[in-house]
Image (tube, grey):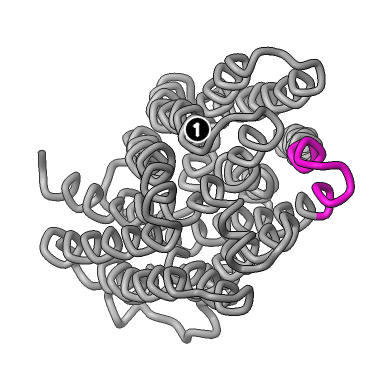
C-alpha cells in the first residue's frame, strides 16, 4: 500500500472517532436522560448542538483545508475533539453536556472532510469515487464501536466510560495523523485573504454546479444520524421491548450495512458514472421506505426480526450518499475542492441539526415513530427537488 493510501486511512481514523462519539446517545439515551435530568425531546435538542456547531465550523474548516493543508487542520481538530469527549464524560447537567456537544461538533467538523479532501487532491479523478466509498466505509466502523461494544460498556461501566473510550480513540487518531501523513504545504503565494476564502465557500454552496448535490445532502446525513445516532436505540428498547444489549446487536447489523454500503456505492459510481444521479435518488427513496415500513411494522406488531432486516437494508441503501462527494468533485477544480466539499458538508450537518430538532418536537407530540417519519418525509422532498434541479441543468 502506497503512502497516499496510508495517509488517507490515517486521516480516516478521525472519522471513526466522530461516528463513534456522535452515535453514542442512541445506545445510552435512557441513562443520559436520567442522569442529566432531561426528557427525550430535551436530549434530542442537546445532541442537536453537535451537528449545529459542526455545520457552523465547516466554513473555517473549508478555508483551512485549502489554505494551510489537511494535516495541520486535522491535528488541530482532533485535539479539540478529544477535549470535547472528556467534557462529555464529566458532564453532570444539561448545560455541561450542551457545552461538550458543541466542542465535539467543532472538533469533528473536519473528520470526514480531511481524508476526502486529501484523496481529492492526491488521487486521480476516476479513482476518487471509489476512495470516497472506502473512507465512508472505514469511518462507519466507528458506529460498530457504539453498537454492541459500547452497549456492554454503558451497561456495566456507565455512559461516562463510553465518552472516555472515545477520547482515547481521538488521541490514537491524532498520533496516526502525526506520524503517517505526509503533505506538501499549499503555496502561500496563491493565497487570497481569509475573507475572500470564506466568501468562496458560501458562493460554492449556492453555485449552480453544486446546488443539486447540496440539496440532497440536506437530509441525507440527517436520516443516518436520526436513525442510527439517536432514535434507533429508543425505538428498539421502548417501542419493541428489547434490552440495551439486544438493541445494540440490531444496531450492529445496521452498522455493518453502513460499512459495506459505501464500498458498493463507490464501485457503482465508478462503473456507472452516467447514472450516478439515479443511483443516489434510488438509494435514498429505498432507504426511507425501509424506515416507513419499520414504523408500520411496529404499529402492526410485526416480529422484531423484521426491524433488523429493514435497518440493515436502510444502511445499504442510504450509503448511496457517497455519490454526493463524487458529484461535487467532478464540478470543482482541485485547488477549490476543500472549500467545495466543506460547503456540501455544511448542508450535511446543517440539515441534520434542523432535522434533529424537528424530530424531537415530533417525538414529543406523536412518539418515536413520528420522529422517524419526519426524516422519511424530508428525504422524499429533497429527492424531488434534486430531480427537478438535475432536469433543469440537462
Rendered image quadrant of residue 158? bottom left
Q: Can you see residue 159?
A: yes
Asked if the stretch drawn in magenta spans residue 370, the answer is yes
Q: Residue at x 29, y 81 (%)?
A: 188
- Residue 370 coordinates in the image, percent (x, y): 82, 39
Please identify the quadrant where the C terminus is shown: top right
Observer-nearest of 75 and 184:
75
Q: Position of residue 334 (x, y in %)?
A: 38, 56
Q: Position of residue 154 (x, y in %)?
A: 42, 50
Residue where numbered disc 1 is placed: 251
Foreground: 30 or 295?
30
In this view, the residue farthest toward the front is 156
Judge left or right: residue 185 versus residue 255: left
* Residue 113: x %, y % from top left: 42, 57
Element on which disc 1 rests:
helix
Q: Is residue 332 above or below residue 278?
A: below
Crowding around mark 1 (Cα neighbors within 10 Å: few <14, some 14 to 19, many 20+) is many
Residue lying at 38% horizontally and 72% vertically, measured from the top left = 86
In the depicted structure, whether residue 242 falls above or below residue 244: above
Magenta stretch secondary structure, dominant: helix
* Magenta span of residues: 361-374
Quadrant in which the N terminus appears: top left
Residue in the image at 43% along x and 43% along y: 151
Amino acid at each position: 500500500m502506497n503512502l497516499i493510501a496510508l495517509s488517507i486511512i490515517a486521516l480516516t481514523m478521525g472519522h471513526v472517532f466522530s461516528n463513534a462519539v456522535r452515535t453514542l446517545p442512541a445506545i445510552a439515551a435512557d441513562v443520559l436522560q436520567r442522569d442529566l435530568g432531561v426528557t427525550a425531546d430535551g436530549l434530542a435538542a442537546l445532541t442537536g448542538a453537535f451537528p449545529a456547531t459542526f455545520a457552523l465550523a465547516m466554513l473555517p474548516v473549508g478555508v483551512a483545508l485549502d489554505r494551510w493543508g489537511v494535516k495541520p487542520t486535522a491535528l488541530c481538530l482532533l485535539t479539540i475533539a478529544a477535549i470535547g469527549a472528556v467534557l462529555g464524560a464529566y458532564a453532570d447537567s444539561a448545560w455541561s453536556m450542551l457545552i461538550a456537544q458543541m466542542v465535539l461538533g467543532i472538533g469533528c467538523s473536519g473528520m470526514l472532510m480531511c481524508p476526502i479532501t486529501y484523496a481529492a487532491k492526491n488521487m486521480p479523478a476516476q479513482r476518487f469515487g471509489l476512495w470516497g466509498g472506502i473512507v465512508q466505509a472505514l469511518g462507519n466502523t466507528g458506529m460498530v464501536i457504539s453498537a454492541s461494544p459500547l452497549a456492554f460498556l454503558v451497561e456495566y461501566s456507565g455512559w461516562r466510560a463510553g465518552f472516555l473510550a472515545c477520547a482515547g480513540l481521538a488521541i490514537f487518531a491524532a498520533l496516526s495523523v502525526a506520524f503517517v501523513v505526509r503533505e506538501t504545504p499549499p503555496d502561500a503565494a496563491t493565497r487570497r485573504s481569509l475573507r475572500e476564502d470564506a466568501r468562496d465557500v458560501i458562493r460554492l454552496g449556492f453555485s449552480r454546479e453544486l446546488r443539486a448535490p447540496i440539496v440532497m445532502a440536506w437530509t441525507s446525513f440527517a436520516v443516518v444520524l436520526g436513525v442510527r445516532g439517536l432514535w434507533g436505540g429508543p425505538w428498539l428498547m421502548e417501542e419493541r421491548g428489547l434490552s440495551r444489549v439486544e438493541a445494540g446487536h440490531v444496531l450492529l447489523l445496521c452498522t455493518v450495512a453502513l460499512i459495506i454500503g459505501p464500498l458498493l456505492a463507490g464501485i457503482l459510481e465508478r462503473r456507472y458514472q452516467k447514472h450516478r444521479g439515479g443511483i443516489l435518488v434510488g438509494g435514498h427513496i429505498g432507504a426511507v421506505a425501509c424506515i416507513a415500513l419499520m414504523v408500520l411494522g411496529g404499529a402492526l406488531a410485526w416480529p422484531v426480526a423484521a426491524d433488523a432486516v429493514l435497518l440493515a437494508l436502510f444502511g445499504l441503501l442510504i450509503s448511496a450518499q457517497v455519490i454526493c462527494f463524487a458529484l461535487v468533485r467532478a464540478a470543482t477544480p482541485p485547488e477549490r475542492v476543500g472549500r467545495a466539499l466543506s460547503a456540501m458538508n455544511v448542508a450535511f450537518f446543517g440539515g441534520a441539526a434542523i432535522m434533529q430538532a424537528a424530530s424531537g418536537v415530533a417525538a414529543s407530540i406523536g412518539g418515536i415513530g413520528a420522529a422517524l417519519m419526519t426524516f422519511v418525509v424530508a428525504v422524499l422532498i429533497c429527492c424531488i427537488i434534486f430531480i427537478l434541479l438535475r432536469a433543469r441543468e440537462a
